[in-house]
C-alpha cells in the first residue's frame, strides 16, 4: 500500500517551517480540503498537532497530518515544492511511480 511521501526538498521546507512553531517536536504539516471541499483544492498549514480523525504520516523526520478526505486523495502521491525566480514557494502534488 502506498501512502503520501515527501521529496527531500519538501521535507527540508517543512522542517524549516515547523522549527519556528511553538512546539517543533509536535508540529507538522496539515493537509485538508480548502473551504467546503467541493472545489477539490487542498490547503496546507503548519500546525501544532493533528486534528481529531487525522491520519499521521511520518516520513524523513517530518510529521504530516492528513484530514480523512485528503488522506484518501493523497495515498499514492508525493509532495514536492516549487521555487519561483521571484522567491515564491508552493507545494506540488504528483503521482508516485509504482
Image: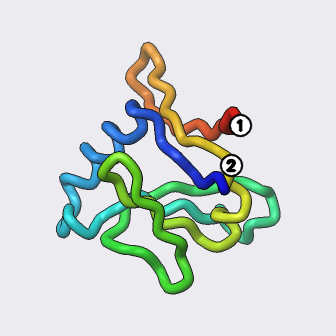
- Residue 30 shows which numbered tag? none
Residue for point 18% across, 67% down:
22
Report x, y in % for residue 9: 39, 31
Image-based side of 35 in relation to 26, left or right: right
Figure coloring: rainbow
Proximity of marks 1 and 2: CB atoms separated by less than 8 Å:
yes
SS for callout 2:
loop
Residue for point 47% across, 80% down:
51
Farthest residue to the top: give it. 85
Report x, y in % for residue 74: 66, 54
Residue at which label 1 appears: 98
Note whether 29 is above or below 66 in the view shown. Answer: above
Report x, y in % for residue 26: 26, 69
The quadrant the C terminus occupies is: top right
First in sequence, mark 1 or 2: give its number. Answer: 2
The crowding category of the residue bearing disc 2, from other C-alpha atoms within 10 Å (few below 14, some 14 to 19, many at least 20), is some
The quadrant the N terminus occupies is: bottom right
| Quadrant of res 12 | top left
Question: Observer-nearest residue: 17 or 57?
Answer: 57
| Quadrant of res 67 | bottom right
Question: Observer-nearest residue: 44 or 71?
Answer: 71
Image-based side of 24 in relation to 57, left or right: left
Residue for point 19% across, 68% down:
23
Residue at which label 2 appears: 76
Report x, y in % for residue 15: 28, 46
Image-based side of 77 in relation to 50, left or right: right
SS for callout 1:
loop
Farthest residue to the bottom: give it. 52
| Quadrant of res 83 | top left
The CA span between labels 1 and 2 is 9 Å
Q: Which of labels 1 and 2 is toward the front?
A: 1
Residue for point 58% across, 56% down:
43
Amino acid at each position: 500500500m502506498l501512502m503520501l511521501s515527501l521529496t527531500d526538498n519538501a521535507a527540508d521546507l517543512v522542517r524549516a517551517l515547523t522549527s519556528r512553531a511553538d512546539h517543533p517536536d509536535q508540529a507538522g504539516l496539515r493537509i485538508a480540503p480548502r473551504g467546503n471541499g467541493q472545489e477539490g483544492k487542498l490547503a496546507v498549514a503548519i500546525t501544532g498537532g493533528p486534528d481529531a480523525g487525522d491520519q499521521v504520516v511520518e516520513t524523513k523526520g517530518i510529521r504530516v497530518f492528513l484530514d480523512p478526505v485528503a488522506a484518501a486523495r493523497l495515498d499514492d502521491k508525493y509532495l514536492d515544492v516549487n521555487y519561483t525566480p521571484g522567491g515564491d514557494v508552493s507545494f506540488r502534488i504528483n503521482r508516485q511511480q509504482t
